[in-house]
C-alpha cells in the first residue's frame, strides 16, 4: 500500500521560521466603526444622532487588523481563538513576480481635467525564490490549522505558480486524507500568449480539520438538454430532477473575474475576487453565526460577504491601502459594527500624521432640546513623505478619501458615529468637507475628526465643545 503520509517536501531553510515572535506582540484597538454614512442632502449632510454613543452599544460582527498576519495568528492563538474558526479562506501571494498598485482618479481642479495616482499595495516577489515563499507560508498554514474548529475548513486560493508545492505542505500539515476538494475556478478575459494556452484558471485547495467538517451542498442549474429530456430517459425511473438543480462539481465556470471597470463591485483593487466566489465558499463550509477568517484581506471581500451572510469575521492585511479600501467598502455596505485593530510594533506612529485643521464648529438652534452643529475641515496637508507625490493643483477635496466623526472621543479608541465618503466611481472632488449634525443641547461634546487620505495615512484632530 502506498504510504502517502510519509512523503514530505524538504528545502534547506524548512522550519527556520517556526519559532514564536521574540517580543511580546503589541495589540491595540484603534477604532470602533458603526457604519452610518452621511447622505447627501442639499449639499450639506444633515443627520440626527439620537444616542451619541450608539456605536458603543452594539456588538461588533467583525474585526479588521492592520499588521502582519503571522503576528496576528500568534496573537489569536494566545488569546482564546484556538480551535474557534469554522472557515478560513486565504488568497495569499502566488509567487507571480508582479507588483500590484491601486490607481485612483483625481480631478485636477486648475485645469478641470482628470489625473491619477498609483499607490503601491503589495509586491509578490517571485525573485526571492520558492524556498523563501515556502518559509513564509509554512508557519502560517500550521497556525491556521490550530485556529480551525473541529468542524472547520481551510480554503487556499492559488494558481499554477505554486499551488503544487503548497498542496504537499498541506498534505503534511493536515494529512492527505484531509483534502476534500481541489477546486478549479475557470474564468475568461484578458490577453493570452502565442507560445502556450491561455492560463485561465486558479486552484482552490480545500482541507478539513476533521471528518466532522461543515458541508452544505451547492447546486447549479441543469443544462438545457437535461431539462428538456429529464433524467429518467437516460438513467431510469429512480432518478428525478431536483428542484435545487444539479449538484455542483469541483470545477467552477459560472463565476467570472471582475473584468469590467464599471462593474458595481469593482473597487479597482488589484487581485480583487468576485463576491459570488466567496459567497459559494462561505455557503458551503460555514453556518449562520460561524466565525470565519481571511488573513490576506485585500479589498475586504470575505469581510463584506460575511456581513451580508450573517457570519462573524476576522480579517487582516499589512497594507494600509488594503485596510482603507476594506473600511470604505464595509461602511458603504452599512451592515453591522466592526472594530479596527492593530498588531505588531509601531505600525502607524503618530509622527506619520498629516496636518489637519478643523473649522471652529458653529451651531444653530433647531428646537429646545437640540441644535444643528456644523463641522468642517478647513485645511489638510499630507505628511511630508507624500508631499513629493502631490500636485499643487489637486486641492484638499481630492486628497481626502473619507472622514469620520466621534462625538465623544475618549482619547483612546475612536468610535466612528458618522462617516463622509466620496463617490468611489468618480474619484474626483465630490466629497463634502462639512457635515451638519443634530445633537442634544444639554450635552458636552469632545468631537474628534479622523481623515483617511488617498495615500493610506489617517490623521485625527480633537475639539472640546460645550453647547
Ligand atoms: C491577493 S491579495 C488578496 C485579495 C483579496 N482576496 C480580495 O478579494 O481583494 C493579497 C493581500 O494580502 C496582503 N498580504 C500579503 N502578505 C501579508 C502578510 N504577511 N500579512 C498580512 N497581509 C498580507 C497584501 O497586502 C494583499 O492585500
Image (tube, rainbow, N blue to C red):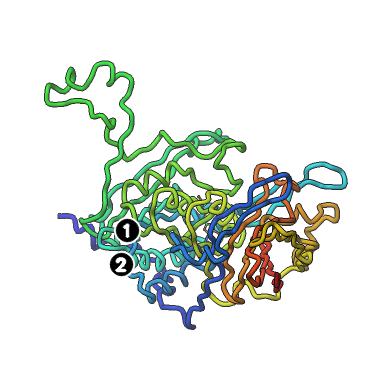
Q: Answer yes or no: is residue 165 visible.
A: no
Crowd band around label 2 with a 10 angstrom C-alpha radius: few (<14), some (14–19), many (20+) = some
Residue at (61% x, 58% y) in the render: 418
Q: Residue 83: which numbered mark, if any? A: 2
Q: Which mark is residue 86?
A: 1
Does residue 158 sit above or below 19 in this rendering?
A: above
Q: Between residue 15 and residue 378, name the one nearer to us.
A: 378
Residue lying furthest bottom in this view? 23
Q: Secondary structure at mark 1?
A: strand
| Residue 12 pos. (x, y %) | 42, 70
Question: What residue is shown at x 64% (from left), y 48% (from top)?
Answer: 39
Q: Nearer the viewer, residue 412 or 6?
A: 412
Tell me if label 1 and label 2 are in contact, CB under 8 Å: no
Left or right of residue 47, residue 138 in this image: left
Residue at x-position 61% and y-position 72%: 409
Q: Is residue 418 above or below residue 360?
A: above
* Residue 284 x %, y %: 32, 46
Would you say the beta carbon of the disc 2 residue lies within 8 angstroms of ligand 1?
no
Amino acid at each position: 500500500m502506498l504510504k502517502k503520509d510519509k512523503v514530505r517536501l524538504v528545502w534547506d531553510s524548512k522550519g527556520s521560521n517556526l519559532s514564536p515572535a521574540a517580543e511580546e506582540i503589541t495589540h491595540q484597538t484603534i477604532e470602533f466603526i458603526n457604519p452610518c454614512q452621511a447622505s447627501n442632502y442639499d449639499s450639506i449632510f444633515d443627520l440626527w444622532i439620537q444616542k451619541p454613543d450608539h456605536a458603543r452599544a452594539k456588538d461588533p460582527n467583525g474585526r479588521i487588523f492592520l499588521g502582519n498576519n503571522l503576528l496576528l495568528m500568534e496573537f489569536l492563538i494566545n488569546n482564546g481563538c484556538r480551535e474557534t474558526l469554522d472557515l478560513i479562506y486565504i488568497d495569499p501571494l502566488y509567487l507571480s513576480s508582479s507588483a500590484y498598485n491601486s490607481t485612483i482618479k483625481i480631478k485636477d481642479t486648475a485645469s478641470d481635467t482628470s489625473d491619477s495616482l498609483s499607490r503601491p499595495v503589495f509586491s509578490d516577489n517571485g525573485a526571492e525564490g520558492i524556498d523563501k515563499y515556502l518559509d513564509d507560508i509554512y508557519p502560517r498554514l500550521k497556525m491556521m490549522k490550530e485556529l480551525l474548529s473541529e468542524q472547520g475548513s481551510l480554503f487556499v486560493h492559488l494558481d499554477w505558480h505554486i499551488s503544487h508545492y503548497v498542496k504537499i505542505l498541506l498534505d503534511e500539515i493536515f494529512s492527505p486524507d484531509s483534502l476534500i476538494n481541489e477546486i478549479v475556478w475557470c474564468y475568461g478575459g484578458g490577453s493570452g500568449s502565442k507560445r502556450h494556452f491561455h492560463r485561465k484558471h486558479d486552484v482552490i485547495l480545500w482541507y478539513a480539520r476533521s471528518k466532522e467538517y461543515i458541508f452544505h451542498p451547492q447546486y447549479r442549474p441543469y443544462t438545457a438538454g437535461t431539462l428538456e429530456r429529464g433524467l429518467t430517459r437516460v438513467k431510469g425511473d429512480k432518478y428525478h430532477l431536483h428542484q435545487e438543480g444539479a449538484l455542483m462539481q469541483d470545477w467552477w465556470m459560472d463565476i467570472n473575474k471582475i473584468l469590467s471597470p464599471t462593474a458595481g463591485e469593482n473597487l479597482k483593487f488589484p487581485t480583487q475576487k468576485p463576491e459570488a466566489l466567496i459567497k459559494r465558499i462561505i455557503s458551503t463550509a460555514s453556518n449562520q453565526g460561524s466565525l470565519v477568517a481571511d488573513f490576506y484581506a485585500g479589498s475586504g471581500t470575505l469581510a463584506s460577504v460575511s456581513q451580508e451572510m450573517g457570519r462573524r469575521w476576522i480579517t487582516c492585511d499589512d497594507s494600509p491601502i488594503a485596510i482603507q479600501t476594506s473600511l470604505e467598502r464595509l461602511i458603504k455596505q452599512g451592515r453591522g459594527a466592526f472594530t479596527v485593530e492593530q498588531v505588531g510594533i509601531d505600525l502607524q506612529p503618530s509622527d506619520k500624521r498629516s496636518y489637519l485643521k478643523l473649522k471652529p464648529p458653529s451651531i444653530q438652534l433647531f428646537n429646545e432640546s437640540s441644535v444643528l452643529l456644523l463641522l468642517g475641515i478647513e485645511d489638510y496637508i499630507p505628511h511630508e513623505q507624500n508631499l513629493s507625490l502631490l500636485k499643487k493643483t489637486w486641492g484638499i477635496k481630492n486628497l481626502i478619501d473619507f472622514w469620520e466623526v466621534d462625538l465623544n472621543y475618549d482619547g483612546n479608541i475612536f468610535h466612528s458615529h458618522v462617516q463622509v465618503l466620496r463617490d468611489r466611481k468618480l474619484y474626483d472632488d465630490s466629497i463634502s468637507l462639512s457635515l451638519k449634525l443634530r445633537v442634544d443641547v444639554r450635552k458636552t461634546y469632545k468631537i474628534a475628526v479622523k481623515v483617511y487620505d488617498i495615500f493610506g495615512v489617517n490623521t485625527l484632530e480633537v475639539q472640546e465643545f460645550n453647547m
